[in-house]
């Protein structure tokens, strides 16, 4: 058996993990969800969820990965809990599932890079989107996107993923800053900042009401809807519950502060979501478009439509969709790596072979989503409302109650923190984080089956 791979540098690990976190979730979903849920109100709730719940959860995944130095399923066995391998299986399946349709959206992005160059969508942006989003075209581009993902993963941890993300992540940051500065100069973009960033505190109000004589506390405004969404969004956005952070942490070689790494990742992930909002929301306002519906429509129809009517629209379009593409790729490679790691840890197979083989299987699983966007929505809903919270719950229960004390010691390794810090983390995992996930899961199930 050959030596297991490792990251060449600590920065390499952090950049790869940021690359996994920063993706379509930040650029495609985050700005529009923020706008839709009352701007800064959602932003505040989201940031609390990302740091208060996402950070402890990402540390839980890091602990499992670094302590075991194995793939997301083998890790549980290596730590001495063979019966808990199902949690790893759940994460692996979730990652597989998500990557199948994420790659279809990645294909759309590829198409929009080309479409910006030729001006293909400049005429009727909505008609263009529906002509490419589903059917043979979408399948072809889904194949191209998966091929790119396979190409990077086939080169391995240090020569593939680390080298690629070392270049990708800084580019995303620099280009988004430049685009945000450019959006600021557009006439009419001004009110967009208010829309994106002004809080509506009435939505955070608590009210006491009675039903059939029983008093109960409720939130004024849609906070009861915002909180579970913010929690799911934080998990998705931080690539939790998909095996990705466990797998990436399993290639860490050495004692470094997992706290520092985790915090850096949460900060950058939040920052890039906000930056993306500072690009797209003002851009839409400059075009006189209210970012209403969100989702696919918003990014691919409204934002693309805006490029048709601004100076240098083609150049800006290529740059913008180029950034979205890089972000999507650096996320997708982390999910393919989850399954590739499992295969090469367990079987005598070469990395390139496995990357191609599993890439092909994921491509097939994505065919329904590429054929009809209704399937894509169904895959996405199931992931968000069932697989993700269930998988994160499994990890929390394992780390919080089953693994417990050794997890705490592993977390403190490489830091100067005392025992109290680790104990606080474990306590947070068992209480606040656990509760938030249970509530999110229950509400998700109600939405799915209710
Ligand atoms: N963290 C990613 C994002 O915010 O877009 C989520 C993700 C999705 C990661 C799909 C990887 C992936 F293949
Ligand atoms: Na993200």
Image (cartoon, rainbow, N blue to C red):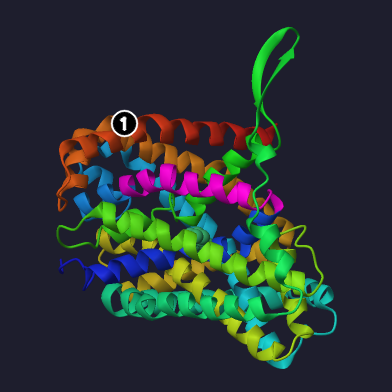
Q: Is residue 229 above or below residue 244?
A: above
Q: Is residue 271 above or below residue 201?
A: below
Q: Nearer the viewer, residue 53 or 128?
A: 53
Could you tell me which residue is drawn at 68 percent across and 67 percent down? 281
Instruction: Give the quarter of the image for residue 290.
Output: bottom right
Could you tell me which residue is drawn at 77 percent across and 58 percent down? 292
Residue 295 x %, y %:
69, 60
Looking at the rendered image, the quarter that the N terminus falls into is bottom left
| Left or right for 25, reference 429 | right
Magenta stretch holds residue 48 = yes
Q: Is residue 422 above or below residue 214?
A: below
Instruction: Give the quarter of the image for residue 18.
Output: bottom left
Could you tell me which residue is drawn at 56 percent across and 74 percent down? 324
Magenta part, dominant SS: helix
Q: Say which residue label 1 marks.
A: 427
Q: Nearer the viewer, residue 154 or 31?
A: 31
Q: Is residue 350 above or below residue 251?
A: below
| Left or right for 49, reference 290 | left
Q: Which stretch did the figure color magenta?
A: 36-60
Other residues around mark 1 within 10 Å, as few (<14) / some (14–19) / many (≥20): some
């Amino acid at each position: 058996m050959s030596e297991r791979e490792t990251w060449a540098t600590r920065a390499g690990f952090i950049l790869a993990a940021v690359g996994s976190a920063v993706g379509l979730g930040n650029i495609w979903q985050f700005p529009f969800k923020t706008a839709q849920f009352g701007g800064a109100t959602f932003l505040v709730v989201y940031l609390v969820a990302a740091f208060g719940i996402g950070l402890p959860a990402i540390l839980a995944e890091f602990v499992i990965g670094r302590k075991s130095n194995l793939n997301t399923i083998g890790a549980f066995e290596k730590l001495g809990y063979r019966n808990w391998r199902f949690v790893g299986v759940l994460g692996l399946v979730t990652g597989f599932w998500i990557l199948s349709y994420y790659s279809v959206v990645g294909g759309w992005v590829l198409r929009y890079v080309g479409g910006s160059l030729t001006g293909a969508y400049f005429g009727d942006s909505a008609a263009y989107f529906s002509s490419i989003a589903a059917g043979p075209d979408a399948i072809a581009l889904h194949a191209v996107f998966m091929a790119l993902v396979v190409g990077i993963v086939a080169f391995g941890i240090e020569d593939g993923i680390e080298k690629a993300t070392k270049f990708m992540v800084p580019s995303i940051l620099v280009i988004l800053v430049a685009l945000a500065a450019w959006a600021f100069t557009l006439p009419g973009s001004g009110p967009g900042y208010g829309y994106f960033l002004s809080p509506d505190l009435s939505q955070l109000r608590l009210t006491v009401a009675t039903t059939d004589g029983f008093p109960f506390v409720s939130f004024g405004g849609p906070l009861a809807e915002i909180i579970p969404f913010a929690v799911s969004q934080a998990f998705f956005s931080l690539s939790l519950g998909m095996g990705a952070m466990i797998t990436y942490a399993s290639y860490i070689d050495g004692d470094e502060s997992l706290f520092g790494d985790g915090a850096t990742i949460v900060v950058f992930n939040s920052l890039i979501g906000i930056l993306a909002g500072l690009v797209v929301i003002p851009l839409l306002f400059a075009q006189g478009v209210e970012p209403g519906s969100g989702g696919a429509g918003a990014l691919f129809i409204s934002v693309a439509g805006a490029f048709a009517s601004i100076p240098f629209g083609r150049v800006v379009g290529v740059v913008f969709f180029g950034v979205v593409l890089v972000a999507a790729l650096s996320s997708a490679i982390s999910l393919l790596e989850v399954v590739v790691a499992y295969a090469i840890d367990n079987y005598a197979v070469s990395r390139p072979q496995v990357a191609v083989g599993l890439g092909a299987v994921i491509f097939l699983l994505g065919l329904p989503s590429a054929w009809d966007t209704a399937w894509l929505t169904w895959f996405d809903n199931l992931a968000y409302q069932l697989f993700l919270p269930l998988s994160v719950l499994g990890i929390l229960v394992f780390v919080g109650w089953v693994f417990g004390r050794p997890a705490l010691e592993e977390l403190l390794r490489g830091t100067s923190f005392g025992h109290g810090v680790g104990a606080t983390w474990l306590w947070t995992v068992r209480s606040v984080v656990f509760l938030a996930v249970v509530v999110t899961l229950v509400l998700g199930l109600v939405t799915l089956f209710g």
